[in-house]
Image (cartoon, rainbow, N blue to C red):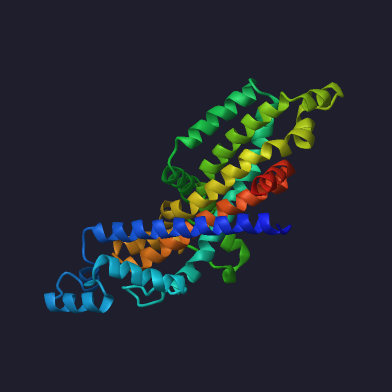
């Protein structure tokens, strides 16, 4: 067996799983759209359209063909990179995604940076002083955030920072060309809204792992040497506690790609989430199908990347994976 075979086999298996997941997601999405009430042709032409015009548009869009024929035709085009055209605008779905994706990607990246930057010191402080007033207060705050829906967090932030203080715009998107300060200002409140739940999750996961790590023998040796709890956490306990945090970040980022619909709609951001909500309400099946496929692919690819990152964090997992594939 060649030295590179285990890695090639692992990559091949992940690609097969990716293809299987995307096929199932596409099929279920196509089936769900076909069961939705309403007629895309009627939605495009309006309620006053004649039955003849609706029937002609059905034929033009291929909606008069059987379900399996339509799905296989769409799937064959999608494999070649053709996701179809929007029923409403006749713009290619790929072009719509290319225009909207940067806003969503930037929003998710900013929200994750905020969530991680806030969760790490909060978890370290709570774990180093577990059972103290700091730990109990942080737990109360985290559980409050976890139980609060995103749209409520967004409304509170808008009321405080936009309405009362007037520091940031309540909604709307400012492109980078208008100035980096204004651009980031238009994304700050949405990013904070999207970061709330991930922050709470990351803090609880990392705190639990740090508390467990503090009980290990090497941490007892570090404390015996007179190293402070905070310094011991940053120098010795943090890296062994990163695995579950990495898993949480990977899963959360994948989920946020599809769940930022509310945030983008609330703040009037031209991202994939808002476009997905609009295309569903407009019965734009071609656009919905393409958006769902891209979101599902991003979710699977991110989780595959997390598996690869595991080996960088803990070399023992990389060695174990090689042993299994031999």
Residue 144 point in image, percent of width and height: 49, 32
In the image, 205 versus 278, the foreground residue is 205
> Left or right: where does residue 271 sit relative to residue 208?
left
User: Which quadrant: the N terminus?
Assistant: bottom right
> Would you say residue 103 is visible in this rendering?
yes
For image coordinates 41% across by 74% down, the residue present is 77
In the image, 141 versus 73, the foreground residue is 73
In the image, 155 versus 26, the foreground residue is 26
Residue 142 point in image, percent of width and height: 54, 33
For image coordinates 49% across by 70% down, the residue present is 99
Q: Residue furthest left?
A: 51
Residue 70 point in image, percent of width and height: 30, 70
For image coordinates 58% across by 68% down, the residue present is 176
Image: 146 above or below 182: above
For image coordinates 65% across by 32% down, the residue present is 209
Q: Residue furthest front?
A: 1
Q: Residue furthest right?
A: 225
Residue 90 point in image, percent of width and height: 35, 77
Image: 112 above or below 224: below
> Would you say residue 167 is visible in this rendering?
no
> Left or right: where does residue 216 sit relative to residue 285?
right
Image: 93 above or below 257: below
| Marker count (numbered) | 0
């Amino acid at each position: 067996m060649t030295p590179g075979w285990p890695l090639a086999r692992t990559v091949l298996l992940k690609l097969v799983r990716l293809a299987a997941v995307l096929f199932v997601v596409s099929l279920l999405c196509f089936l769900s759209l076909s069961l939705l009430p309403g007629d895309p042709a009627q939605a495009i032409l309006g309620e006053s359209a004649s039955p003849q015009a609706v029937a002609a548009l059905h034929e033009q869009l291929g909606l008069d063909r059987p379900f399996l024929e339509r799905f296989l035709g769409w799937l064959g085009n999608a494999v070649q990179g053709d996701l179809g055209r929007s029923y409403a605008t006749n713009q290619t779905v790929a072009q719509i995604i290319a225009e909207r994706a940067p806003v969503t990607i930037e929003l998710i990246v900013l929200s994750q940076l905020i969530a991680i930057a806030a969760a790490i010191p909060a978890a370290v402080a709570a774990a180093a002083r577990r059972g103290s007033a700091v730990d109990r207060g942080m737990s109360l705050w985290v559980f409050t955030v976890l139980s609060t829906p995103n749209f409520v967090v967004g409304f509170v932030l808008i009321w405080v920072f936009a309405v009362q203080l007037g520091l940031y715009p309540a909604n709307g998107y400012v492109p980078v060309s208008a100035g980096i300060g204004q651009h980031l200002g238009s994304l700050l409140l949405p990013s904070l809204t999207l970061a709330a739940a991930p922050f709470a999750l990351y803090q609880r996961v990392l705190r639990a792992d740090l508390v467990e790590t503090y009980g290990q023998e090497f941490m007892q040796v570090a404390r015996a040497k007179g190293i402070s709890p905070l310094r011991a956490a940053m120098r010795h306990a943090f890296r062994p506690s990163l695995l579950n945090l990495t898993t949480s970040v990977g899963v959360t980022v994948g989920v946020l790609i599809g769940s930022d619909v509310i945030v983008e709609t609330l703040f009037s951001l031209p991202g994939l989430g808002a476009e997905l909500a609009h295309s569903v309400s407009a019965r734009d099946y071609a656009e919905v199908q393409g958006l769902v496929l891209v979101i599902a692919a991003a979710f699977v690819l991110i989780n595959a990347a997390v598996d690869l990152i595991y080996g960088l964090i803990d070399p023992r997992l990389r060695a174990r994976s090689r042993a299994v594939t031999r």
